[in-house]
Amino acid sequence: AQKVTQAQTEISVVEKEDVTLDCVYETRDTTYYLFWYKQPPSGELVFLIRRNSFDEQNEISGRYSWNFQKSTSSFNFTITASQVVDSAVYFCALSEAQGRGSTLGRLYFGRGTQLTVWP
Amino acid sequence: GAGVSQSPRYKVTKRGQDVALRCDPISGHVSLYWYRQALGQGPEFLTYFNYEAQQDKSGLPNDRFSAERPEGSISTLTIQRTEQRDSAMYRCASSLGSGQALYEQYFGPGTRLTVT
């Protein structure tokens, strides 16, 4: 079973629109970490954020914000006032910290959401 | 300081040839991970080293794939008798490997492997 599900394969918006990328995860560990990475057309993986399972505070960084809800096992990512440079594939990932048969630090990635922002 | 480096950045090889992909982690990083990313997919775990010890190779797809990290620094992922289905981006990541830092993985630029 997929540990991380990103149901949205592709999203297209027009510049200045807000957009939310969904991420649902599955784990039996009580301690875990959630991540978002950006993969621009150049192909590198750019780290955006890491949250641990004990910190459900939402976080805002400039135009980016993240909504972590343990009750629904979701860690959604919102870009406010999107820009063309935000066009990329965005990956959500999970790392389980209790190592039940899993290498500590190993990342489980979702399949990614391709975001296209049109001018 | 220098980030994770990988070489070559691009590799085109013919089916049946062996290839070796190199990863040079950040200095001092004891944990090293290899991932494979097929087109249109997220990266998938291949193997993990703690110092020179390969502690998890459960993600290696078959015995044509092997990895080593003999001195606890540079790692090599080797694919023998390559097949077209091996075509993918191969990514390496490293971390300090203890405490919270275990979960701060830094990724290299990847090696794009194409098997013709």
Image (tube, helix red, strand yellow):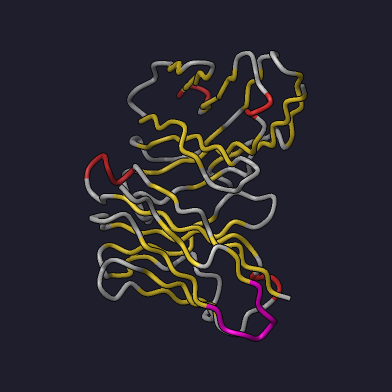
- Residue B16 colored magenta? yes
Q: Can residue A36 be seen in this view?
A: yes
Which residues fall within the magenta stretch?
B12-19
A108 on left or right of A30: right
Q: Which residue is drawn at 49% across and 47% down?
A: A108
Q: Residue at x 57, y 83 (%)?
A: B18
Q: Quadrant of residue A60?
A: top left
> Residue A62 in the image: x percent, y percent?
48, 16
A8 on left or right of B3: right
Above or below, A26 against B91 in this view is above
B88 on left or right of B62: right
> Residue A65 in the image: x percent, y percent?
50, 18
Front-lying residue, B83 or B11: B11
Dominant SS type (magenta): loop
Front-lying residue, B116 or B101: B116
Quarter of the image for the C terminus of chain B: give it. bottom right
Above or below, B14 against B21 in this view is below
> Residue B32 in the image: x percent, y percent?
35, 59
> Residue A53 in the image: x percent, y percent?
37, 29
Q: Which residue is drawn at 55% across and 52% down?
A: B43
Above or below, A62 against B43 in this view is above
Q: Can residue A1 be seen in this view?
A: no
- Count up the numbered dots: 0
Q: Quadrant of residue B111?
A: bottom right
Q: Which residue is drawn at 52% across and 20% down?
A: A64
- Residue B40 colored magenta? no
Above or below, B40 against A27 in this view is below
Name, please, the residue furthest toward the front. B1
